[in-house]
Image (spheres, rainbow, N blue to C red):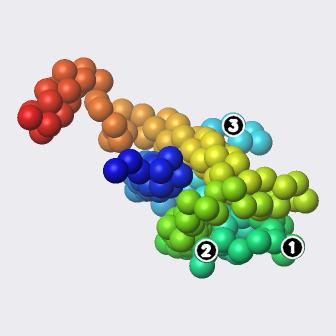
Amino acid sequence: MTTPLADLYLSDVRTRMRGVKALGDGALAQLRPGEWHTALSDGGNSAAILVHHLAGNMHSRWGGLRGGYAPGVEGETPGRDRDAEFEEGDRTPDELRAVWEGGWTVFLDALDHLQPADLTGTLTIRGEPHTVLEAIQRQVAHYSGHVYQIVLLVKTLRGADWQTLSIPRGGSAAYNARLEAEHR
C-alpha cells in the first residue's frame, strides 16, 4: 500500500521543522548571557530580536490552528505588533528561552494537528489567501532563514569556541562510514 503524498509531506515537514528548531536550540545554548542582545552590525538583529520575532510570527500565524484546521482562520492576529518584535528589549536569557519554546510549541502543535485534507484549505495572511500548504512552505523558508541567521550570529560570536551543529570539517568520511554501518 502506498502512502498518499500529503501524508508524506506532513510527516517530512514535521520532522524537518523539529530539526530546524534543534539547530536553533544548539546555537542558542552556546550564547553567553551578555551576548543575547548583541548584533553583528548597526541595524542588525540580535539573537533576542530574532527569537522575539520568530515567536511573534509563530503565535500569529499558527495560534488559530493549534487544535486543527478550521475554515476562515486568519494567519495574522489583530493584536500582533510586528514592528515591536524588532526593538531590542531587556529580556533575560531565561525569558528569551521561554519565548522561543512558546513560539515553537504553537507552530509544532499546529503542524501536528493538521490532516492531509487540510493542506488545500485556505488560510488568510494579511488579507492574502494561501492554501495551508503554501502557508507552511512560506513559514518553512522564513523560520529556517532566521534560524540560520542565529547560527551565523552565534558562530561568529563564539569564534574558535563554536561547537559545530553538523558534520565537523574533515569529518565527512567518518560520518559517512558510520551511516553506512548503521544501515547494513
Answer yes or no: is residue 133 visible: yes
Q: Is disc 3 in contact with disc 1, using a CB cutoff of under 8 Å?
A: no
Would you identify the image quadrant in which residue 166 lies?
A: top left
For the residues labelled 2 and 3, the Cα–Cα distance comes to: 41 Å
Q: Is residue 36 above or below residue 159?
A: below
**Mark 2 falls on what kind of element?**
loop
Q: Amino acid at mark 1?
A: Pro
74 left or right of 89 in image: right
Q: Which residue is mark 1?
A: 78
Residue 43 x %, y %:
77, 42
For the residues labelled 1 and 2, the Cα–Cα distance comes to: 20 Å
Q: Which residue is mark 3?
A: 41
44 left or right of 148 in image: right
Would you identify the image quadrant in which residue 72 lies?
A: bottom right
**Mark 1 falls on what kind of element?**
loop
Residue in view at x 67 percent, y 67 percent:
62
Sort mark 1 into few (<14), some (14-19) or many (20+) by Cα contacts within 10 Å: few
Q: Amino acid at mark 2?
A: Gly
For the residues labelled 3 and 1, the Cα–Cα distance comes to: 32 Å
First-in-chain label (2 vs 3): 3
Residue 26 x %, y %:
39, 51
Q: Is residue 32 above or below residue 80?
A: above
**Mark 3 falls on what kind of element?**
loop
